[in-house]
Image (cartoon, rainbow, N blue to C red):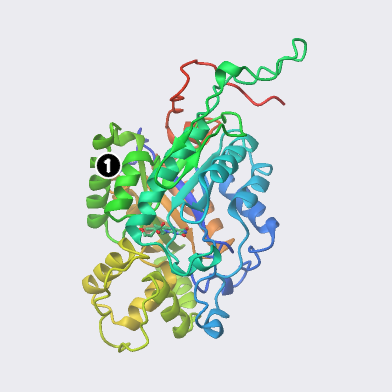
Amino acid sequence: MSRSPAASKRQMKLAMFMTGDGNYHMAGWRMPGATCDGGQNIRRWVDAARTIERGKLDMLFIADGPGVSGLDDLRTLSHVSRIDRMDPVTVLCALAMATERLGLVATISTSYTEPYNVARQVASLDHISDGRAGWNIVTSGNKDDAQNFNLETHTPHADRYARAEEFVDVVRGLWDSYDDDAFPRDVAAGRYMNPDKVKLINHKGKHFRVRGPATTPRSPQGHPVLVQAGSSEAGMNLSARVADIVFTSQSQVKNARDFYNDVKGRCDNFGRSPDDMKVMPGVLIFSGDSEAEAREKFELLQSLIPLPVAMQRLSNNLGGVDLSGFDLEKPLPDIPVNSARVSAIESYLTISRRDGLTLRQMAMRAAAAKHHWTLIGSVGQVADALEEWFVDGAADGFSILAHSNPNGIDEFVDKIVPELRRRGLFRTEYEGHTLRDNLGLSRPANRFFHSTARQHASV
Ligand SMILES: Cc1cc2nc3c(=O)[nH]c(=O)nc-3n(C[C@H](O)[C@H](O)[C@H](O)COP(=O)(O)O)c2cc1C
């Protein structure tokens, strides 16, 4: 079934979302043909990025966290490919030189960095990539990350979001701290910078005191693209105020539609149009020439997850809750919402109650896709389901979680993308050069300067 045989005007935005080794499914690294050294091998990333760009996806989006989770049980952790990973901004700078049009989005925590550093890093990536950079703003869901940053415990949820709100304002202020033509670099006149085109932001807030200006001139996109991934009340409000893209975890079209309307409905409170924000839920896809073939791949990977690994991951995803005393054959117990995670706990409880899952079943499902949507089917069935969410107002596009690298990426680019294109649901060519151009988002005005000058990087 295809609801849109003719080309429709509105087209999906698509991201490939990758963890540190590129295999999203917990056993993805064991898929025949999968690579498993992405945590230290840049060639894996270059190959993946080129494939994703061949598919003309909007962006490659890297998850991250400044710490290893699951350290309480190293023996169980030793079966997982979620330990080693390279810094995403560093990886993306290398990929900027290996690609031309692909958007490059790095996850960076507002809880364990300073805004001055982040403003500088992401603006640098925007210069290096000629306008293709994005930052996924997270407050960090792993409670143990705190111990790498002079703290005993993770900061409570509300405090993390309060810091994140101010953090983003400082970063955006720094990105505006020069006009686009602040650097004439007039060799003959000996005039490098125009002093009227620089602004010291002199920010003095609850969490930060930052004088500015940035060291990086205003970047090609003005503001690199902002992604926000928290889905609690606080997360949705932050998204409505600042996010160009919302990455969210939704497991059913109805809930996804409710979330979509809720988060977009909040934009008005911040003087923004809902069209300024693209909502892109995550989806783990297993496809094949037939549904049976897709299911076989899924079952193969499920059979390779050791139960202790699944339980450890679920415990981490629930914010570090100890699940050892609970009966595996009974439903997931009522987990109190804790300070590490809010929306994730609510999502897990919803899924397990709705689908009547035991704790064991929930853990195995979480090891595949966490609390994201899992889609298993023939190419046509996968395209039908994506189209349904898109047309029914549940998504502006999707963040594809490839079960393994390169298998899951190839599968999507070579089979699903052509089918979406045939239905008029996805581009055949990139529309522009910057990530904002391709997402259909405008370049933000500079809050301090009103000139229309736009500086291009000199070659
Ligand atoms: C879809 C999604 C993706 C996330 N990705 C990351 C990530 O890559 N790294 C990280 O440290 N935290 C990540 N988080 C955690 C959030 O930044 C946040 O700390 C946590 O979810 C609590 O916020 P919430 O209750 O608003 O969702 C993610 C959260 C969601 C919902």
Would you name the residue on which mark 1 appears?
264
Q: Which image quarter: residue 132?
A: top right
Compared with 401, 443 (above or below) is above
Q: Work out whether residue 170 or residue 72 is closer to the camera in this orientation and state it.
A: 170
The number of discs equals 1
Compared with 224, 412 (above or below) is below
Q: Quadrant of the C terminus?
A: top right
Give residue 297's position: percent from left, percent from top.
48, 71
- The residue lying at 26 percent from left, 86 percent from top is 330
Q: Work out whether residue 389 or residue 196 is closer to the camera in this orientation and state it.
A: 196
Amino acid at circle 1:
Lys
- The residue lying at 25 percent from left, 81 percent from top is 331
In the image, farthest residue toward the top: 189
Give residue 249's position: percent from left, percent from top.
35, 58
Q: Work out whether residue 10 or residue 203 is closer to the camera in this orientation and state it.
A: 203
- The residue lying at 60 percent from left, 21 percent from top is 455
Compared with 109, 441 (above or below) is above
Query: Which structural element holds mark 1?
Result: helix
Give residue 81's position: percent from left, percent from top.
57, 72
The 10 Å Cα crowd at callout 1, few under 14, some 14 to 19, many 20 or more, is many
Q: Is residue 156 left or right of residue 215?
A: left
The quarter of the image that holds ligand 1 is bottom left
Q: Which image quarter: residue 361?
A: bottom left
Q: Work out whether residue 15 or residue 299 is closer to the camera in this orientation and state it.
A: 15
Give residue 282's position: percent from left, percent from top.
40, 56
- The residue lying at 36 percent from left, 71 percent from top is 318
Q: Is residue 429 visible?
A: no
